[in-house]
Amino acid sequence: MGTSAAFHLARLGLTNVILLERESQLGAASTGRNAGGVRHQFSQEANVRLSIESIKVFEDFDAIVGATIDFRQDGYLFLLSEPAHVAAFRAACDMQRRLGVTVEWLTPAEAASRIPGLLTGGVEAATFCARDGICDPDGVTMGFAAAAKRAGVEIRRGAEVTGIEVDARGVAAVRTPQETIHTRVVINAAGAWAGKIGEMAGAPLPIWPLRRHIFIAAPPRHGWGFDARTLVIDFASSFYFHREGANMLFGMGDPSEPPGFDTTVNWPVLEQIAPVAARRLPSLSDASIAKAWAGLYEMTPDAMPVIGPAGVDGLFAIAGFSGHGFQHSPAAGRILADLIAGRDPHFDLTPFRHDRFREATAGEVGVV
């Protein structure tokens, strides 16, 4: 989000921008730990619109940004086994089609035919969008960063924000251990740490960290039986998998996981995943785990992000994407840059207002 916002500001001629990164390299936190999924299939129209714009950028990233990325559109396949989920996805599918997204409504047999070895017992329906897929988070981040630097943006690594100064006019400065940077505009793109950054300016955001695991399985002796990188999601359980080279990447949410910044691997989670994996992709039962890691979702109460002004004059947020942030970075960065530059972003940001949480608002259903 930070590099996208910096890139889009630079495209508008606003190059007096400093991007502060706490770590020694970009993308060391959630960006570098996610599965790279990119999809149109969301339940909220605003999220679908972010996807439409962002995926167009991913498809033409070299021409737009000047960097080559690995983007494979092998589709997302959602398996639906509960009546409430079927109804919600049917409504979402109608909305997505109205926006011009080609989404297929499949029978269980049709879904099984897409992935040899996939079991669909108990599945009532499925959805598939061929333009969804897997993209390279590191390549996208570095592409935005390099293009921003070429335009004059400064990127400072190892620069942790320790405070934000506010005066009668709003944001006045940002403090790091090395210096105080005087500025009237601050973008909070701190992901799972965005709530803490907001507190520094006296404008807390309801964003909290939630650990999610990713496991990589080496192929079993007889192989997986399919090569497509289609990302398959058993929606009721949140179990998902897709081919990652010769291996299989998979994971599943843990409803008992408390909020926190712990990113160590909790190996007992595999005991919860094993029966679901065996029920959907039995070949995983014969595979060995080659690698595992954990990252942080940046959750909000309605699983929707905050994009725009964030409670103090000059303070903007682009955070709280609740597990689908990377894929929306092109559109979100462009929209925020337009706002800061005083341009009309041509996007209804009502669902992303920072103060919406005082009201009852519709949330995003399609979070796994």
Image (cartoon, rainbow, N blue to C red):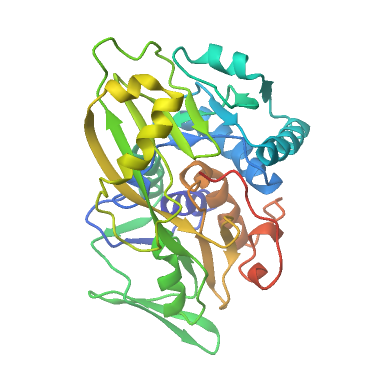
Q: Is residue 339 above or below residue 253?
A: below
**Which residue is depicted at the point 46% across and 49% down?**
4
- Tell whether 333 sits left or right of 124: left
Residue 291 visible, this angle: yes
Residue at the far bottom in the pictured view = 168
**Which residue is depicted at the point 61% across and 55% down?**
338
Residue nearer the viewer, 237 or 2: 237
Tell me residue 228's x, y (percent).
44, 16
**Which residue is depicted at the point 43% across and 46% down?**
253
Tell me which corner region of the image, top left, top right, bottom left or bottom right, holds residue 123. top right
Q: Is residue 51 above or below residue 301?
A: above
Tell me residue 247's x, y (percent).
29, 23
Tell me residue 13's x, y (percent).
52, 54
Q: Is residue 161 above or below residue 285?
A: below
Residue nearer the viewer, 303 or 258: 258
Residue nearer the viewer, 181 or 293: 293
**Which residue is depicted at the point 48% across and 48% down?**
323
Tell me residue 320's x, y (percent).
51, 58
